[in-house]
Image: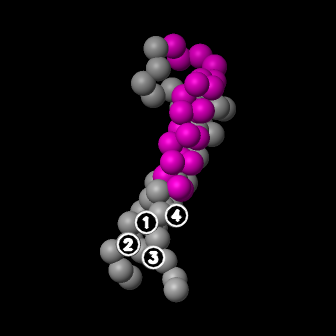
């Protein structure tokens, strides 16, 4: 596995983690770093979805190109 492949896989895995965290925030299960402890935090969920999309885009640019 080349370096660019491993970076691409790592960024893809990070994107999956961000999607899971976003889902937990949207369901109100995850309450880390929030001032209130009740209900879902949709702003945090949207932030993590944006981070996931950015990770997937970066993974696409990092993957090795085929000729």
Q: Earlier in the sequence, mark 2 or mark 3?
A: 2
Between residue 66 and residue 35, name the one nearer to us: 66
Residue drawn at x 47%, y 63% is 61
Does the residue at mark 2 contact the one at mark 3 (Cβ under 8 Å)? Answer: yes
On the picture, is 11 further left or further right than 46? left
| Label 2 crowd (10 A; few <14 / some 14-19 / many >=20) | some
Q: Where residue 44 appears, x then y in whole percent?
A: 54, 28
Residue drawn at x 64%, y 32% is 26
Does the residue at mark 1 contact the one at mark 4 (Cβ under 8 Å)? Answer: yes
Q: Secondary structure at mark 2?
A: helix
Looking at the image, residue 21 lies above or below residue 45: below
Looking at the image, residue 42 lies above or below residue 60: above
| Label 4 crowd (10 A; few <14 / some 14-19 / many >=20) | some
Q: Where residue 56 appears, x then y in whole percent?
A: 53, 56
* Residue ID for mark 2: 4
Q: Secondary structure at mark 3?
A: loop
Looking at the image, residue 48 lies above or below residue 43: below
- Asked if the magenta segment contains residue 47, the reply would be yes
Does the residue at mark 2 contact the one at mark 1 (Cβ under 8 Å)? Answer: yes
Residue drawn at x 49%, y 77% is 65
* Residue ID for mark 1: 62
Residue bounds of the magenta highlight = 36-57
Instruction: For marks 2 and 1, give the CA distance.
Output: 6 Å
Q: Secondary structure at mark 1?
A: helix
* Residue ID for mark 3: 64
């Amino acid at each position: 596995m080349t370096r660019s492949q491993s970076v691409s896989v790592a960024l893809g895995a990070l994107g999956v983690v961000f999607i899971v965290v976003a889902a937990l925030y949207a369901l109100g299960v995850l309450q880390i770093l929030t001032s209130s402890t009740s209900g879902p935090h949709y702003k945090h969920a949207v932030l993590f979805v944006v981070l996931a999309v950015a990770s997937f885009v970066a993974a696409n640019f990092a993957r090795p190109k085929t000729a």
